Image (cartoon, helix red, strand yellow):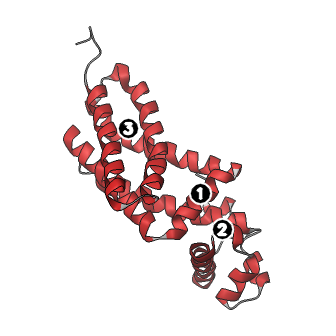
Amino acid sequence: MPKEESVLRRPPKQERSRERVEDILGAAKRLIGEKGIDAVKMREIAALTGSPISSIYQYFPNKSAIIATLHQQWSAEIMGVLKQALDEVNDLDQLFAATAHLLDFYHERIRSDPAILDLINATQADKALKNIDIAETRKQTAYFCAIARPWIPESRFDAFSRISFMMFQLAYGAVRLALLVENDEANAILSDYKMIIRVQLNEFSRPEKGVE
């Protein structure tokens, strides 16, 4: 994923500047949660921060740069939770439990913050942002596969990596669907997706037929 310097027009170096950028991002996220990304204007972000719009443009060339930076923050949060969940894994059962926990966290975190769902939707509609999202998914998948490697036959590891990449990317679709239905159905959808993950882990952990 691109570093913050590739998104910001003027990377903050002093504490005061970093606080200013966080104020802008906080205001943008609040407005996104209230109105949706498409309805948010740069002048509204400036008004909410109590500063002239020129101060926004000092750091962000456009709204897409703000969205990209918010996506970077979200991705960093997910990677942090991923590492925390996986770093204590010692066997395949623990790997599945950690993966199930990650899916539950992902669902609850998005459910509790409407701006995140709108942010993720925006990344799917913008080619540049979509590429950033895919790159982040690849990074998360690589970390997951590195943890899983001791329990996956070497001959099947490349296929396992491809399936894992697909499962990570599709997790958003499962969570998004769960957010659109009633609680009982949502829980069933998440349970079904966990079962798919479990089946895949079990399948890939077995040696290929004819290979010991």
The x, y position of residue 72, in whole percent, is 56, 61
Callout in the foreground (2, 3): 2
Image vertical order of residue 148 relative to residue 189, above or below: above
The x, y position of residue 188, in whole percent, is 31, 50
Q: Earlier in the sequence, mark 1 or mark 2?
A: 2
Q: Which residue is mark 3?
A: 145
Q: Residue at x 39, y 29 (%)?
A: 160
- For marks 2 and 3, give the CA distance: 34 Å
- For marks 1 and 3, give the CA distance: 26 Å
Q: Quadrant of the C terminus?
A: top left
Tell me the kind of residue under disc 2.
Ile
Q: Earlier in the sequence, mark 2 or mark 3?
A: 2
Q: Earlier in the sequence, mark 1 or mark 3?
A: 1
For residue 14, the mark is none
The image quarter containing residue 197 is top left
- For marks 1 and 2, give the CA distance: 9 Å
Number of other residues with Cα within 10 Å of mark 1, as a class: few under 14, some 14 to 19, many 20 or more: some
Image vertical order of residue 43 relative to residue 181, above or below: below
From the viewer's perspective, is 26 left or right of 84? right
Q: Residue at x 67, y 70 (%)?
A: 11
Helix, strand or loop for disc 2: helix
Q: Which residue is mark 2?
A: 37
Q: Is mark 1 in CB contact (under 8 Å) with mark 2?
A: yes
